[in-house]
Amino acid sequence: MIEFSTFEKSFLFILLGLTLYSGIRSYKILFATIKRGRNNLSKITVHRTWKVLTEKIILLLPTWKTRFWSNLFHIMIVWGFLIFLIINIYDLLNRFFPTFTIPSPFAKILFPLTDIFSGLIIAGVFYFSLRRLFFHKDLMIRGNVKLIPDIRKKINQDSAIVIALIFIHVTSRILAESLKAVYIPNNLWLPITNTISSIWIPTPFVIFFWKVFSWSTLISLFLFIPYFPYSKHFHLMLAPINYLLKQDTKTLSAIQRIDFEDETQELFGAVRLEELESSSILDSYACIMCCRCQNVCPPYNSGSELSPAAFEINKRYYLNQNFGRMNSSSFESLPLTEFAITEKAVWDCTTCGACVNVCPVGIDPLSDILQIRRHLVLMQDRYPKSFQVLFKNLERYANPWGIHNIHRLDWAAGHQIRTVEQNPDPDILWWVGCAGAYDSLAQKSSLAFLNLLNHAEINFSVLGQLENCTGDSARRAGKEDLFYQLATANVEILNEINPKRIVTSCAHCYHVLKNEYSDFGGNYDVIHSSELLLELLDKNKLVMRKNFNSERISFQDPCYLSRFNYKSDSLYSVLEKSNCEISTSPFNHSATWCCGAGGSQIWKEPEYSEKSINDIRFEQLTSVSTKKLITACPFCKSMLSDANQKAEMSVVVQDLSEYFIENIIMEN
Ligand code: SF4
Ligand code: SF4
């Protein structure tokens, strides 16, 4: 008979009980560990579940951005995994109750799907094994990056164990089913099972081998269930859960406000795993260790010790090493800077968000890095020396340049410009920004924009001496108390003025005014200068020259416009109006490459000595034979101009406004 004996069923019952016990215990420890973080997990709703199910699990949409073949094989394994979740339950019930079956319409779908996906899973397993064996596509992280000792060995061992268990499980099941079909024809379209079955000869050995393969199917499953939470392949389950529980935020890596008036708050930022948010702990389990984030990380690619992938992988292996301890509130983990990331690496991050944008499973290393910075600055008073000047200037003069506010409008001397005191009811309040007011290169862009506004006869005002730094540099450097101070003061002024619309040419000011001041009670209609230019061109308030030569330009998408705020469409639309030919670098739109200024890097020296980020970006942009680089942020302009000078090239680096003023009919 093709069925288990009573003794075998009893043995199976005991094994199943032990597996479930150890599995449930592991999962309980795991969820208690995740819950040790600061709770920021979202509620699960039907809409959210449906979205995650369709976009992230069934279609695996986020993974298709790169690596087509790997994704194809990956999707086979993911779908196969889902099908095997169901078929394993059926198999178990069938071993206990051999007459148990499922209704015909479902059987006609489930069994053929299982058959096909068994073949696809085996193909996927072969693909990934060969890739690892012959192309050494294992953890490719440079030697200067911090990694837990022996981590490569552990990852290879883990992969070998999981691949072996999957292979044994799937092949054993196919063989068992093909042997069963010798005695019990299935009348279903099972191309793999029935083809193999056709080669067996009905002898008593068939039953013996059916039992052997049935047991190896079950034992591989029973070994897999408790091992799964330790394995990197646990992402198959935790990546969808991560998506399901992630809070929706306004933008990538939204930064949480600290309430400095709350005197009960004793911990600022985070330096240990349990001090991070729960979603950050969950991130470590969801990581598929693909290193996509590292490939697009500008500091890593310029030789830095910073690798967002290594950071997540180290977090994960530390959790594995301390499984069963991390869940206890009395256990204090090591500081992250001792095992997951060096302090130098923490200070190298440009906060460009490329890692978050590219991650196929929605992991956010940037938020953790900012939490560590906060902790180092606010709790330990540790930060790069050059930030002393930045913080002092922001405290004393409310701008990073350390120039008194009475000079805020010096750049516009002799030009037609009115402050809110002179024109209290403007249609547009122009937030010039500290760079636009004090940096000589950015002042040229401000003048160009001023001329465009005046030419289009816009009713606008500026804040003049009332304008302070938005605090972006302080916040990204971890000095949240200073940001709090600047943000509170700015919001108070802005709320009093109650502007109809705010326009700014600075990508960083734009991001903070639009997305971060709402936590301080400041909700404004904020637009970038490119959006206003587009509007003015559409309304014919600005008219392009008809006879100007179409020229070839390269465009630098600022991270805080094109990635954090998905503004690249308006940026490119406005450029297209100018009839220019845009040469695209390999990194553009939301996949742009940072100029190297963000995350307060512009105020400090890099922590490494290889090629600078701005030089790399300049090369990328000029590799497409262009004589003109256009950007839409004063910090990008400054960094690319420096690189231009260093490279001794005669490329013209301009802000959008400067480029436009050359191509607009200025005479009325
Ligand atoms: S935010 Fe940018 S610089 Fe920072 S880790 Fe991510 S990719 Fe690297
Ligand atoms: S964080 Fe995301 S992109 Fe980076 S290695 Fe992990 S899964 Fe890949």
Image (cartoon, helix red, strand yellow):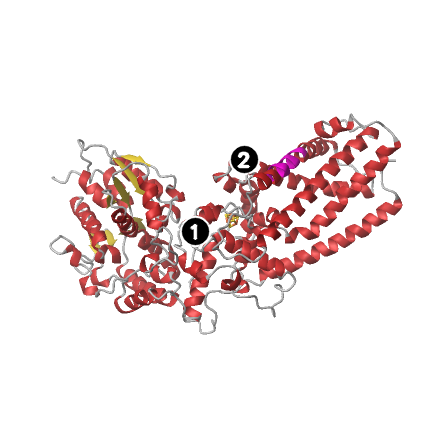
> What span is colored magenta in the figure?
119-128
Is residue 447 shown above or below 325? above
Residue 209 in picture, x, y percent from top left: 82, 36
Disc on res. 69: 2
Residue 99 in picture, x, y percent from top left: 83, 37
Q: What amino acid does circle 2 point to?
A: Trp
Q: For disc 1, does the CB lie below 8 Å from ligand 1? A: yes
Q: Is mark 2 on a helix, strand or loop?
A: helix
Q: Is mark 1 on a helix, strand or loop?
A: helix
Give the quarter of the figure containing the C terminus: top left
Q: What amino acid does circle 1 point to?
A: Tyr
Residue that badge 1 annotates: 300
- Queried whether the magenta region covers residue 123, the answer comes back as yes
- The CA span between labels 1 and 2 is 25 Å
Is residue 133 shown above or below 143? above
Answer with mark 1 or mark 2, whichever residue precedes in sequence: 2
Give the quarter of the figure containing the N terminus: top right
> Are the residues flagged by discs 1 and 2 in contact, CB closer than 8 Å?
no
Q: In this view, does 431 lie to the left or right of 129?
A: left
Q: Is residue 410 left or right of residue 627?
A: left
